[in-house]
């Protein structure tokens, strides 16, 4: 649904669909009561009939309400006012947007609560929820069901007491919404459209925001010795590449912080080919790289006061006569050798070289990598949490805190030398899989061997980056998970 979002004074006459909020006691803010004055006891009677109590996220839908010149009145419950947190306003914005029919041309959301108007930051979070929920990826649909109207642009006005203050507060959220949208688009694209070279081309669009973008082609990576990454993509007709993005918004000479993403644009599993069932989902095996690009767009758009490096390794893991074989041994850029036991454990090979490259070239304060790395993390945590592995307690705690604040939840997992035996190789420094037990942990342990002593965290987003359960702010297969989380991490701890 195309969305035109604006902030308007509370006195603005509502049009189209009217959305208002009430608490768990069915109380409304003073501005809302004025808007609903002409409806008499309509809302209370409808609430009684529907047993609507105003609980958080619950809705009451009244079509063609008497006394109002709107097509539909939607009452959204917020629960107990004292319990509301910033992430709850994002959710409420998503709920509100979800109640606006796709064929609607206009809607008014009255940002008013019992006890007083919410603060500008809270309304900005509400607007972020509206933006996130409005996203849809339907660019390849050319036909609609009989009688189904093509969604038109909907004009959504959020009525507020101080529109100028809210607009100012919303600027940073707008950047976040755009970053999430960019990431979702990348994850949702089919692999015949978004292959490594095309992904790199889209990343270069960040140049217009002031991001320095450098693309390492196959020749450059061979010269650097990035043989672990190159081995993964050698069976594809599409050349592998790495993209290095730099945003210099902090003090000159200050070491950057770094984010690294796995970008396997399609993963057949290689010679260790995957089963046919759901293999189409492997177009999303680049969700980590998509997050990094979306994050870099967000930070640049809001002019974050920090130096940041974003790096993504882009490959396609295909089956061909030139494909990497089980039993092959590759020498990574770090000089460490890896025996490839399973060609479907390819993401760790990609990340090994990119992590080492970023660490040695930029000497960052810390590194965070994101990857749809293991199915095992879904067995452990389902689709509600991403796995967090780290060698640094402070960085881990800050990530956990950012996850709680944004609702992009993490769960810390162990990583340590007690698992070393599982990845010992008879012929090389390590092997790329450690068997079924602790599969996510041994994958993270391999990555830890390429970060030296730099503070590092690995986020396994296999369960949250694609095909995750849809919620009030996301109805997309590609979720854009991680953009909001990492933007919050940066804003809270690393900007000066």
Image: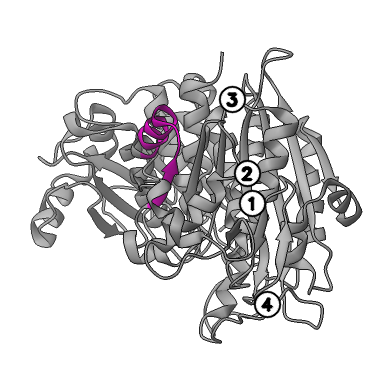
Q: Which one is earlier in the sequence, the residue at label 1 or at label 4?
A: 4
Q: Which one is earlier in the sequence, the residue at label 4 or at label 2?
A: 4
Q: Nearer the viewer, residue 413 or 238?
A: 413
- Per the rendering, the mark at residue 260 is 2
**Residue 224 against residue 396 in the figure, above or below:** below
Q: Which one is earlier in the sequence, the residue at label 3 or at label 2?
A: 2
Q: Nearer the viewer, residue 431 or 99?
A: 431
Q: Nearer the viewer, residue 39 or 300?
A: 300
Kindly report the distance in space between the C-alpha atoms of the residues bearing marks 1 and 4: 38 Å
Q: Which residue is mark 3?
A: 365
Is disc 1 placed on a helix, strand or loop? helix
Q: Are marks 1 and 2 in contact (CB under 8 Å)?
A: yes
Which residue is found at the position 40% from the left and 56% from the top? 98
- Toward which corner of the image does residue 87 lie, by quadrant? top left
Asked if residue 190 lies left or right of residue 91, the reply is right
- Per the rendering, the mark at residue 74 is none
Kindly report the distance in space between the C-alpha atoms of the residues bearing marks 3 and 4: 48 Å
Is disc 3 placed on a helix, strand or loop? loop
Q: Which residue is mark 1?
A: 351
Q: Are marks 3 and 2 in contact (CB under 8 Å)?
A: no
Asked if residue 273 lies left or right of residue 467, the reply is right
x and y percent of residue 389 in the render? Answer: 43, 45
Question: Which region shows up in magenta?
Answer: 386-403
- Residue 45 on the magenta segment: no
x and y percent of residue 318 in the render? Answer: 72, 76
Between marks 3 and 2 in the image, the one whose residue lies nearer the viewer = 3
Q: Which residue is mark 4?
A: 142
Is disc 4 placed on a helix, strand or loop? loop
Assess disc 3: are there few (<14), some (14-19) or many (≥20) residues with their C-alpha within 10 Å of its C-alpha.
some
Which residue is found at the position 51% from the left and 20% from the top? 164
Can the viewer see residue 463?
Answer: no
Which residue is found at the position 63% from the left and 44% from the top? 260
């Amino acid at each position: 649904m195309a969305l035109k979002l604006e902030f308007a004074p509370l006195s603005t006459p509502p049009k189209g669909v009217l959305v208002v909020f009430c608490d768990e006691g069915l109380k409304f803010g003073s501005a809302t009561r004025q808007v609903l004055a002409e409806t008499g006891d309509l809302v209370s009677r409808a609430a009684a009939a529907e047993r609507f109590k105003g609980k958080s996220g619950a809705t009451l839908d009244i079509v063609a309400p008497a006394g109002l010149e709107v097509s539909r009145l939607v009452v959204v419950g917020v629960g107990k006012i004292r319990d509301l947190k910033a992430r709850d306003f994002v959710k409420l914005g998503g709920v509100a947007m979800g109640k606006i029919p796709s064929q609607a041309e206009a809607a008014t959301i009255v940002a008013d609560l019992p006890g007083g108007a919410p603060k500008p930051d809270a309304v900005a979070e509400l607007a972020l929820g509206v933006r996130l929920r409005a996203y849809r990826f339907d660019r390849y649909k050319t036909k609609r069901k009989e009688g189904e109207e093509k969604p038109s642009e909907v004009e959504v006005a959020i009525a507020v007491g101080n529109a100028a203050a809210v607009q100012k507060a919303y600027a940073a959220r707008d950047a976040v919404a755009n970053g999430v949208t960019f990431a979702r688009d990348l994850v949702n694209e089919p692999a015949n459209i978004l292959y490594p070279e095309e992904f790199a081309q889209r990343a270069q669009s960040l140049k217009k925001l002031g991001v320095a973008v450098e693309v390492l082609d196959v020749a450059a990576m061979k010269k650097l010795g990035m043989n672990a990454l190159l081995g993964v993509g050698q069976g594809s007709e599409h050349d592998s590449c790495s993209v290095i993005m730099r945003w210099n918004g902090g003090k000159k000479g200050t070491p950057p912080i770094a984010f690294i993403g796995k970008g396997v644009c399609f993963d057949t599993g290689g010679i260790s080919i995957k089963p046919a069932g759901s293999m189409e989902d492997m177009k999303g095996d680049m969700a980590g790289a998509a997050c990094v690009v979306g994050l870099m767009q967000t930070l640049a758009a809001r002019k974050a006061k920090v130096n940041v490096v974003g790096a993504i390794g882009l490959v396609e893991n295909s089956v061909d006569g030139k494909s990497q074989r089980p039993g092959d041994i590759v020498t990574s850029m770090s000089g460490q050798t890896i025996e490839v036991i399973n060609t479907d454990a390819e993401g760790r090979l990609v990340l090994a070289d990119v992590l080492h490259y970023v660490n040695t070239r930029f000497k960052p304060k810390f590194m965070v990598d994101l990857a749809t790395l293991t199915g095992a993390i879904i067995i452990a945590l389902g689709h509600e949490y991403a796995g967090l592995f780290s060698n640094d307690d402070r960085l881990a705690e800050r990530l956990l805190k950012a996850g709680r604040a944004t609702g992009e939840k993490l769960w810390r997992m162990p990583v340590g030398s007690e698992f070393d035996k599982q990845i010992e190789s008879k012929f090389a420094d390590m092997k790329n899989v450690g068997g079924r037990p602790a599969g996510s942990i041994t994958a993270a342990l391999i990555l830890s061997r390429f970060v030296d002593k730099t503070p590092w965290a690995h986020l396994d987003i296999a369960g949250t980056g694609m095909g995750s359960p849809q919620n009030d702010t996301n109805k997309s297969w590609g979720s854009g998970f991680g953009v909001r989380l990492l933007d919050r991490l940066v804003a809270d701890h690393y900007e000066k």
